[in-house]
Image (cartoon, coloured by chain):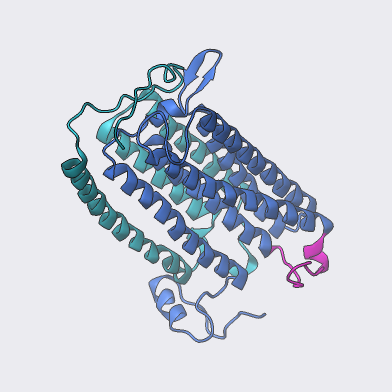
Chain colours: A blue, B cyan
Amino acid sequence: MATSSKLPLKDGLEGFAFDWSSDQRAFKGVPWGKAMMWIFLLSDTFIFSCFLISYMTARWSTVEPWPNTSEVFSLSVAGVSVPLLLIAIMTFILITSSGTMAMAVRSGYQKKRKQAAALLFLTGILGMSFVGMQAFEWTKLISEGIRPWENPFGARQFGSVFFMVTGFHGIHVSFGVIFLFLTARKVLRGDYDTGRRGFFTWQKGRYEIIETLGLYWHFVDLVWVFIFAFFYLW
Amino acid sequence: MAQDGQEHPISTYLAVWILLFVLSACSYAVDYIGFQGITRWSLVILFMFLKAYFICAVFMHMVWERMALVLALFIPTFAIVVFVGIMGFESDYTQLGRKVFFDTGKPPTVYAVPHSNSHDEGQEEEDSH
């Protein structure tokens, strides 16, 4: 698995030209798993872009008024209606989980096994609470009569876009949570120190796996940034 | 080099974390204060891209990656910009068509106000679909 080449690697644009025109591999200095995760995330970017673009198209082409998200997603606390309160809390939770994830990656590279596992576990818990709040939000909206095909507040497309976009994002978070817990268990058991083989791929894992998983998790946070801006705030 | 894995001081992560909190609070404040129109849209876009940049750059270690990887991921996203433009024109055209051919001349439908519990009684019969 040695990746070192005889010639020193060049940096910047020149390095880009050399890397891409070189033999065998274009992405030097990164584990293949990480490069593949990046490629996957790029494809996922296109999927979410298609969702958000279809949302834009639906919203711009409808002749009905679009529901006021500030009111639809408000939550009343002690009788006072606070706009987007739940969404704001969800945003902060997801950012916090991104922070703990970044620290888990760091702990992993420092071979601090228990610390990394604890941070991964914490990230998973935060992700679970995010999904839980989303389930609460869906329940609330469904009880208010919002459906993919109609809603009492305005344009019909609102419901279909909402359930599709947040649903797809929620599924991403849920899968992330599953892999966070699996990886936390592996880290805690010391799989990446002892070279214990995975149950599915039968490959030996390394601490780089935490960084690859971290990329996925940060991407989920990144997508939420765009959904928050375009769907909830626009 | 990335060969040794991405290891950066914890203060960097904490700083970005706090920054993301502040930026999120800012974008939430845009809604809370109730900016409308171009002020709202430009502020929302600004905070969104700043957040996206810091997540990509620091949390996903993009600034420390080699140019070959960065450009491989960054350049294709311009196709999205083109797609946004195309569908922007398309939706404008669709809306024009709907206005021209489906406008019945009747007053617009009155929708319920969220959380007012009044949308049960005030529903009118729909005579056309």
Q: Position of residue B86 (x, y in %)?
A: 26, 57
Indicate whether A215 appears above or below A131: below
**Residue A206 painted magenta:** yes
Considering the whole magenta stretch, tell me its main secondary structure: loop
Which quadrant holds residue A66?
Answer: top left
**Residue B68 painted magenta:** no
Q: Position of residue B90 (x, y in %)?
A: 24, 53
A143 or B71: which is nearer to us?
A143
B70 or A76: which is nearer to us?
A76
Indicate whether A202 appears above or below B24: below
Q: Is residue A129 left or right of residue B94?
A: right
Please indicate, yes or no, whether residue B35 appears anywhere in the rendered image. yes
A230 or B116: which is nearer to us?
B116
Indicate whether B73 appears above or below B39: below
Q: Position of residue B93 (x, y in %)?
A: 20, 50
Q: Across the whole image, how many numbered discs are drawn on residues?
A: 0
Which quadrant holds residue B85?
Answer: bottom left
B127 or A229: which is nearer to us?
B127
Q: Is residue A57 left or right of residue A50?
A: left
Name of the residue lying farthest toward the front: B127
Residue, x 22% and y 48% (percent of image)? B92
Residue, x 83% and y 67% (percent of image)? A194
Name of the residue lying farthest toward the top: A79
Boundaries of the magenta span: A190-207
For the C terminus of chain B, give its image quadrant.
top left
Please indicate, yes or no, whether residue B1 appears anywhere in the rendered image. no
